[in-house]
Image (cartoon, rainbow, N blue to C red):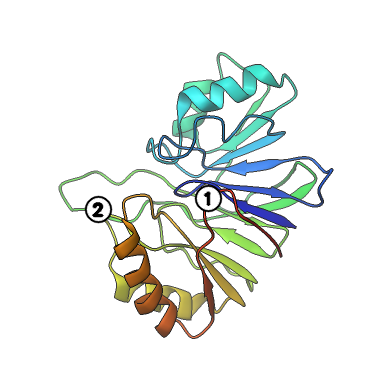
């Protein structure tokens, strides 16, 4: 697969340069056109940094064949405007989107604070190789080659991130959920997390690609 890291938690995946395009979590911290041209869009949960409703609607309007796979709370916001194109999924489901096999893992967003209600959250395992957990530290019941790691959020801390990667045991870890960090913070997380997880760690600049 060809992975392109976009802003914050958004990634674009293709089997090859000319293949269909899959986009995960185009939110408001990602460039507004991140979902344009997508054949399939996956959304892990309803928070706006993962679900930029305007950009998703623009992508669906631009490509009448494009479809969305997401959980109920997001699907309810889109289904009436795009009948038959928005699919509700949950833990244990599997499907094919943009020519890629997807498995769904997880149920709940990580706890931000006991006073803030937990929303639902799902993670997507793509081609049995790349796992995007959304806003949770879900450990899939499947070996993972590439783990997208949420390095910075109001709900996590560095020790939890390190232990999470160690538990999943991927071949490589690629940082995401990093839009709130300045360059100094990005470098610090790179040293602390990257130095202790025990596996290859990388942060791709927005727009940069890597063949997995």
At x 50%, y 30%, the residue is 32
Q: Position of residue 11 (x, y in %)?
A: 58, 49
Q: Are marks 1 and 2 in contact (CB under 8 Å)?
A: no
Looking at the image, which is closer to me, 70 or 51?
Answer: 51
At x 35%, y 78%, the residue is 192
* Disc sitting over residue 19 in the figure: none
Residue 83 visible in the displayed image: no
Eyeballing the image, is 13 above or below 210? Answer: above
Residue 72 visible in the displayed image: yes
Q: Position of residue 204 (x, y in %)?
A: 54, 60
Q: Position of residue 144 (x, y in %)?
A: 63, 71
- Answer with left or right where residue 192 lies relative to residue 117: right
In terms of sequence position, does the residue under pointer 1 or pointer 2 come before the other?
Answer: 2
* Disc sitting over residue 206 in the figure: 1
Q: Secondary structure at mark 1?
A: loop
Residue tagged 2? 112
Marks 1 and 2 sit apart, C-alpha to C-alpha, by: 26 Å
Q: In the orientation shown, which residue stands out farthest toward the left?
A: 115
Place residue 119 in its image quadrant: top left
Mark 1 or mark 2, whichever is nearer to me:
1
Looking at the image, which is closer to me, 69 or 61?
Answer: 61
At x 76%, y 41%, the residue is 98
Pointer 2: residues within 10 angstroms few (<14), some, or many (20+)?
Answer: some
Q: Position of residue 212 (x, y in %)?
A: 71, 65
Pointer 1: residues within 10 angstroms few (<14), some, or many (20+)?
Answer: some
């Amino acid at each position: 697969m060809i992975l392109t890291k976009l802003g914050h938690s958004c990634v674009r995946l293709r089997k090859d340069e000319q293949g269909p395009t899959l986009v995960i979590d185009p939110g408001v911290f990602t460039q507004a056109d991140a979902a344009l041209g997508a054949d399939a869009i996956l959304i892990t949960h309803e928070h706006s940094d993962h679900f930029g409703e305007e950009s998703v609607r623009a992508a669906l309007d631009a490509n009448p064949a494009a479809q969305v796979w997401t959980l109920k709370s997001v699907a309810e916001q889109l289904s009436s405007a795009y009948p038959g194109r928005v699919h509700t999924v949950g833990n244990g489901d599997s499907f094919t989107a943009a020519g890629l096999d997807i498995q769904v893992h997880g149920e709940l967003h990580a706890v931000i604070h006991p006073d803030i209600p937990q929303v639902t959250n799902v993670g997507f395992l793509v081609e049995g190789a790349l796992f995007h957990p959304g806003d949770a530290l879900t450990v899939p019941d499947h070996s993972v080659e590439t783990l997208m790691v949420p390095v910075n959020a109001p709900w996590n801390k560095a020790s939890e991130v390190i232990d999470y990667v160690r538990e999943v045991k991927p071949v490589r870890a690629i940082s995401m959920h990093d839009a709130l960090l300045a360059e100094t913070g990005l470098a610090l997380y790179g040293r602390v997390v990257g130095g202790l997880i025990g596996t290859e760690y990388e942060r791709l600049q927005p727009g940069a690609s890597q063949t997995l």
